Amino acid sequence: MKKQFAVIGLGRFGFSVAKTLSNLGYEVMAIDASEDRIQEASQVVTHVVQADSTDEEAIRALGLRNFDVVVVAIGQDIQASILSTIILKEIGVPKVVVKAQTELHGKVLRKVGADKVIYPERDMGQRVAHHLISSNIIDHIELSEDYSIVEIGASRQMIGRSLRQLDIRAKYGCNVLGIKTGEQINIAPNAEDLIREQDVLVIVGKNSDLEHFEKTFA
Ligand code: ADP
């Protein structure tokens, strides 16, 4: 059985989540209070419903309890986002993923039972900022408050040297998870593998250690 998803709130973020799931071949129920948004979404997803997610009766009637994941992507109206989360957890939705506007909003969502809180603007801002610091930093994914994964393009100081020579683990406390060469990725790099021009290193570590590494090599 394929997973069943519902997305509540079809702003830019919710619409993108619903459309991507649908393109990947999943059934998605898209819910919004606005008729215009529903009209637009009906072009890209299988089921659309015009409903107010703070209306408990209306939400119960949709049978959302039987969905695997419900995404609450209501941006501006923080009260509606919190109320919707409470209702969804109360009716027994197994996994409720909610978009938060601010850290405080996220904290409240956690307290009322959200299984996962996401901060798309904050996360994208961080990724872009890391990319801006150095064009060698291709991507940055935060794993927790203290740990991240970065993708960093081979800089001149790395080219032609092996992981043993670069001594990344001992010197910077970071681990190289993989080396991308064009479309290929070596997910078990060994100490003698040489870094070539155009290679991309995928590295995991503590943020402070990664920054130290980025500053030295980028
Ligand atoms: P984004 O920042 O991702 O564009 P918005 O806050 O602009 O998000 O969009 C949120 C969407 O959620 C809007 O389409 C709005 O109609 C919808 N929405 C807001 N409150 C409710 C609610 N209580 N029930 C259903 N949909 C809602």
Image (cartoon, rainbow, N blue to C red):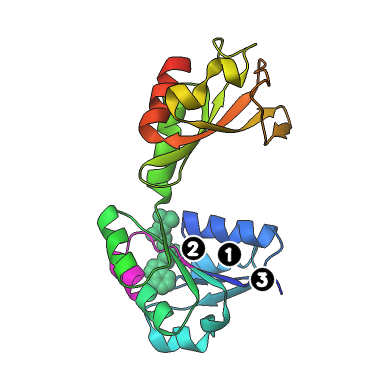
> Residue tagged by mark 1?
41
Q: Residue furthest right?
A: 184
Q: Which mark is residue 52?
A: none
Task: Give me the C-alpha separation between circle 2 and circle 3.
Answer: 14 Å
Judging by the rendered image, the residue that carries numbered circle 2 is: 10
Ligand 1 within 8 Å of disc 2? The answer is: yes
At x 33% / y 60%, what residue is drawn?
Answer: 76
Q: Amino acid at mark 1?
A: Ala
Q: Residue at x 65, y 11 (%)?
A: 160
- Cα separation, mark 1 vs mark 3, equals 9 Å
Q: For the residues labelled 2 and 3, say whether their Cβ atoms are less than 8 Å apart.
A: no
Q: Position of residue 131 (x, y in %)?
A: 47, 28
What range is drawn magenta here? 71-83
Question: Circle 3 — which element?
Answer: loop
Is residue 218 in view? no
> Which is nearer the N-term, disc 1 or disc 3?
1
